[in-house]
Amino acid sequence: MDEKTNFTSFSEAQKQYLSGVAMGADVARTVAGLPVLSKAPGAANGSVVRIGGAAEATAPRAAGPEDLALQAQAATEAAGGKLSKEEQAKRDKNPLDMWDEIQARADAGEFPKGTDVFLTKQQGLFYVAPAQDSYMCRMRIPGGLLYSWQFEGLADLSDRSAGGFVDCTTRGNLQFREIPADQAMEILYGLRELDIVPLGSGADNIRNCTASALSGIDSLELIETIPLAKRMHHYILNHREMYGLPRKFNIAFDGGGRISALDDTNDIGFHAVEVTADQADDALPAGVYFQLTLGGITGHQDFARYTGVLLRPEECIAVAAAIVRVFIVAGNRTDRKLARLKYVLDDWGFDKFLEEVEQRLGKPLRRVSSDRFVVPDNEDRLAHIGFHPQAQEGLYYVGLVLPVGRVTSQQARGIAALAKRFGNGQIRATVWQNLLLPGIQEADIPAVKAAIQDLGLGYQASSFQAGLIACTGSAGCKFANAPTKQHAMEIADSLQAAFDLEQPINIHVTGCHNSCAQHYIGDIGLQGCKVEQGEDMVDGYHVHLGGGWGSRQAIGRRLFESVAWPDVLPLLHAILRAYLEHRQDQQSFVEFAATQSDQQWTALTLSKPVD
């Protein structure tokens, strides 16, 4: 090799690698107080890379926003760390630039292989083998709001290119399943033609931005939040660096109304609060603010915590963007299990982290103690099911009961027709895996009830159906240890037939430790596992009790391990009987569970007859 090597002789991946290494070395040298190497004094735009201490070349491209992630990768290696295989894959091939490659695979009727399976998730396509030899496509529905024409279009697209149904998720979002290899691009084009962009809905990205499902129609809310979720969504789509995270990231906006957005389970939570006149002063005028909370990841048994920062609504997007950029730089690039925001906060502490955010923002954050504002507690755990009055006089919304979050294409077309004929054309997805139709006149309620029943759906839920959450399970996920949707329906039917409760019991059924159904925050949380019985491994669950969120915040305790599926229903019956017989003064389940030790729970359930 000549002493001076022409940079253009390298592949694009090599160029990005060398640029990243140089920039990472700059970071390390700057910290050590040494001069940087990547750009000589007076050099033109572009990175200068030194190879073997002698050769020098200039990168032909200007610095791009995605360089933030490349710098973080290179700094990891400069500090002696080894990139995870996913980080290496993202550096070798930018997943934002795979459109033509995905098209070529679709034309050939092929699915991705190797690390391309991971990278393709960035476009919203998940190859879910071995559970199914097909794609799943997760969308981005900011704030959960879409319109009848979009929902009807989704039904048609599912019939043409997917499994003929639509699933509602726990992020107020939608997804398709059973997509053949040759239909991948039909899905990606079809969604965009419906003004739905799935980019970044999977892999190491900011997932669908959630908001209060009743935003703008809730008489108890402090502020509308769907507009903020939409602004955050479009900010992400238009900033390439927002796709350079070390792991997935969740953002939620809660307006303080009747249906929780579960903001305390998110990496960033914005929860509306009120500074009253008697709490206000010149530095903190009365009004509505957002309490900034950070680090929620209930799958790792942690809730988002208040940072001491209050934000005006117009400040939220810029602050969220600054937080994400700090996470891009500081997040773990070597160990995937430690690559979430929670672990940066655990390592740095809130003070150091917020100082870095302020550096990114270029201004200080507003620090306010929690006794200076009021946090509303308006949640109604049945508000997402049935008919309820809106803030607008004479108008109602209805929450549909969907069997574990799934509707057929034909049902979806019927729902779209109902929204257009009797409502305002809106359809809203909630974090409870169901849909709301707002804008219904009171006089039309009987006709809407009849139409819902004609679709084979419901608008009334038992205390078990209202709080029933289930992930996809082994029918569509390679990680799941049990068919969670099927089991969830059997659980609800069995408990509904045996018990009559005046308040809902949330039962969350998740297939594995990834906790997509957030089993740790359910009154009763079931985590799928395999149970050894003789020489066989059978479906089963670890059973957790006493989880909650918001004002009832608690992480459920694992009290019964490796319960084979045939034994789960008798155990749940025993748990419910113990609760009803021993609770005091109409205690909620989470309140009662907190009063019982592990030994007491064991004694209470063992003393009950088996059904």
Image: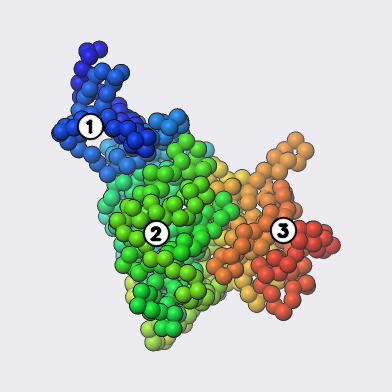
**Mark 2 or 3, closer to the camera:** 2
Q: Nearer the viewer, residue 219 or 155?
A: 219
How far is the residue under mark 3 from the one under mark 1? 67 Å
| Residue identified by numbered label 3 | 569
Task: Indicate which disc, 3 or 1, sits on the residue closer to the N terminus.
Answer: 1
- Asked whether the beta carbons under mark 2 and mark 1 sit within 8 Å of each other, the answer is no
Q: Find residue 262 and name its label.
A: none
Quadrant including the N terminus: top left
Identified by mark 2, the residue type is: Cys
Q: How is the image coloured?
A: rainbow
Query: Where 244 sits versus 567, above or below?
Result: above
Mark 1 crowd level (few <14, some 14–19, many ≥20, 10 Å Cα): some
Query: Where 397 sits versus 593, above or below?
Result: below
Q: Position of residue 97 (x, y in %)?
A: 29, 39
Task: Indicate which disc, 2 or 3, sits on the residue closer to the N terminus.
Answer: 2
| Residue identified by numbered label 2 | 209
Q: Find residue 39 and name its label.
A: 1
Residue 520 horizontal side relative to residue 457, left or right: right
Q: Nearer the viewer, residue 320 or 259?
A: 320
Mark 3 crowd level (few <14, some 14–19, many ≥20, 10 Å Cα): some
Identified by mark 3, the residue type is: Leu
Identify the secondary structure beneath mark 1: loop
Please give the name of the residue rendered at 44% of the width and 44% of the height, measured from the top-left corner.
331
Q: Position of residue 519 (x, y in %)?
A: 60, 56
